[in-house]
Image: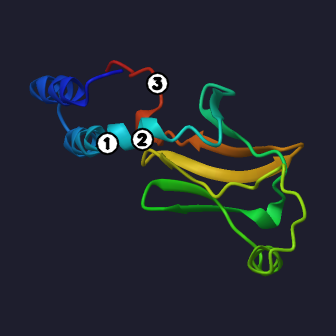
Amino acid sequence: MTNHKAIHSIFTGLRPFTVGFDDMFEHFDNMSNHLPQLTANNYPPYNIVKTGSLTYNIEVALAGYGKKDISVDFEDNMLKIQSVKSKEEKEVEDNDGVLHQGIAKRSFTKSFTIADDVEVKGAELKDGLLKVSLEKIVPDHKKARTINIK
């Protein structure tokens, strides 16, 4: 297991060699402070897949969950995927109406930090797999170009 103090010192050591990345290093510092909690929760399982040069998918395995059972929210660079219990499910739980519960819908919250230049394009639940599509937006002034010499 990686020591979060070692990670913190790596980011601190990189600061003198960069310009304009102060917010990023502060973000990494904050993340490293929460590293034990971040690595402890591995449910539900997920993949982060690079689908193109500027596109990504976060794939979360959610067998047994329907669209009404999941909430996907994005605010302040934080993508949060969490389970939602319907009123009927709460009533069944409260009334102890389940005769046998072999398949439990566990409550979960999974959060991902999204960079400033990445846009959440949408989410789709199909065959028990939630796919959240992301795209990195490259402004014109950062795109590769050839500079004409006068």
Please tell me whether residue 81 is drawn above or below residue 10 in the rendered image: below
The C terminus appears in which quarter of the rendering?
Answer: top left
Three-letter amino acid code of the residue under disc 2:
Leu
Question: Of tags 1 and 3, which is closer to the observer?
Answer: 1
CA neighbours of label 1 inside 10 A, class few (<14), some (14 to 19), many (20+): some
With 54 as the anchor, is 62 left or right in this view? right
Q: Residue 24 or 104: which is nearer the viewer?
A: 104
User: Residue 145 — which label?
Assistant: 3
Mark 2 / mark 3, whichever is N-terminal: 2
Can you give x and y, in whole percent of width and height, for residue 13 in the image? 12, 23
User: Residue 31 — which label?
Assistant: 1
Give the quarter of the image for residue 67: bottom right
Residue wearing tag 2: 38
Q: CA distance from mark 2 to mark 1?
A: 8 Å
Can you give x and y, in whole percent of width and height, for residue 73 in the image? 59, 63
Three-letter amino acid code of the residue under disc 3:
Arg
Mark 2 / mark 1, whichever is N-terminal: 1
